[in-house]
Amino acid sequence: MLDYRVKNVEEIPTPALLVYKEAVAHNIRAIGDMMGGYARLRPHIKTHKMSQIARMEMDEGIDKFKCATPKEAAMLVAIGATDVLISYHIVGANIGRVVDLKRLYPDTDLKVIADDADNIQALSDACTSADVRIGVMVDVNTGMNRTGALPGAPSLALAQQIAQSPGLCFAGLHVYDGHVGDFDGDMRQKTAIESIERAVETRGLIERSGIEMKKMVASGSPGFEHTQRVDGVDEVSPGTWIFWDMGYGDKLQGPFEWAALVLSSVISTTADHLITLDAGSKSVAPDTPAPHFRAMGLPDDIVFVRRNEEHQLLQLPEGTPRPRVGDQFYLVPRHVCTTVNLWDEVCVIDENGMFVETWAVDARGH
């Protein structure tokens, strides 16, 4: 494990989000080793939202990306990404944002997803009016039940509609298997394979209908190592691997290192067994139940008593030496993606453990 202690930590006001550049580089290399290169990798940038990290990925040979928001897509095309999939349903005023982006960057292969006939018609109308052409993937629901058309005939009907719609081109199938996340590795693999097989069967149905299937993009961090080996899957699109976190790290065996931690200080000690940190819900993602993070240097069985906007009150196990006001702790977020979105900038730590610069979280928000 990396030595996460920052040698010039006194220069960093807390709370702060730290990004360890060497750990990021390690994770990029590690996923390339897992996949035998980057040809089938379309990383989701919703975890980091940073042009600097997207550039690190591009420098290693990653040439296509997935994102969640028009703002993330705009960041990617502005730094030279030429193949971008917005894996989100673009409706209402957001249609205009995507059309404008395609108009500004006509040579970019820009794609969106859809699972609704009326939405596809709205996309077609907007693209036709603007004289642009955007790729649309059918979003297929293989078990998560959050979005997506049912496999089989419903997905085929949408593919046919897209292929016949002016201003659009049928770009393939998109599958997110967020329901794959069992702690048991064998069960996780079983669920991932069963899920993707529904999409592969749908792919065959569409191809037999005479529609060209350009590609199928599938899977997040828990399932990609299994689905990447399945015939019919062209690309996988995990995101959390770039920074890793406690949520996935506790359930998945993998080669990734924590690359983004929150640095927090003790600001009060109201009792022998209580300490208050300056990293509340505005510093560490508020969308998970306790434990919200793992504090390096504190026992795993600390009690999360109360979390407010700027405060985190912790109860220490009996016999734990009480830290002093001003002591600092490195916190591993349980959910790093939403933690990153809380910050305007990160403090970059180099390979020597030195804080050397700050990077903007360019695409935070929507």
Image: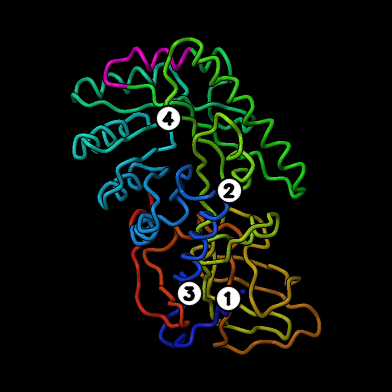
Q: Earlier in the sequence, mark 4 or mark 3?
A: 3
Pair 4/2: label in front: 2
> What range of the chain is rendered magenta?
157-168
User: Residue visible at 64% across and 57% down?
Assistant: 254
Q: Which residue is mark 4?
A: 113
Q: Earlier in the sequence, mark 2 or mark 3?
A: 3
Vertical placement of residue 167 versus 333, above or below: above
Judged from the image, the secondary structure of the residue bearing numbered disc 2 is loop
The CA span between labels 2 and 1 is: 22 Å
User: Residue visible at 64% across and 76% down?
Assistant: 296
Q: Earlier in the sequence, mark 1 or mark 3?
A: 1
Q: Which residue is mark 2?
A: 221
Q: Which residue is mark 3?
A: 15
Residue 264 located left or right of residue 93: right
The CA span between labels 4 and 1 is: 39 Å
User: Residue visible at 59% across and 83% down?
Assistant: 268
Q: Which residue is mark 1?
A: 2
Q: Earlier in the sequence, mark 2 or mark 1?
A: 1
Residue 158 included in the magenta stretch of the image: yes
Pair 2/3: label in front: 2
Judged from the image, the secondary structure of the residue bearing numbered disc 1 is loop
Pair 4/1: label in front: 1
The CA span between labels 1 and 3 is: 21 Å
The CA span between labels 4 and 2 is: 20 Å
Q: Amino acid at mark 4?
A: Ile
Vertical placement of residue 252 versus 94, above or below: below
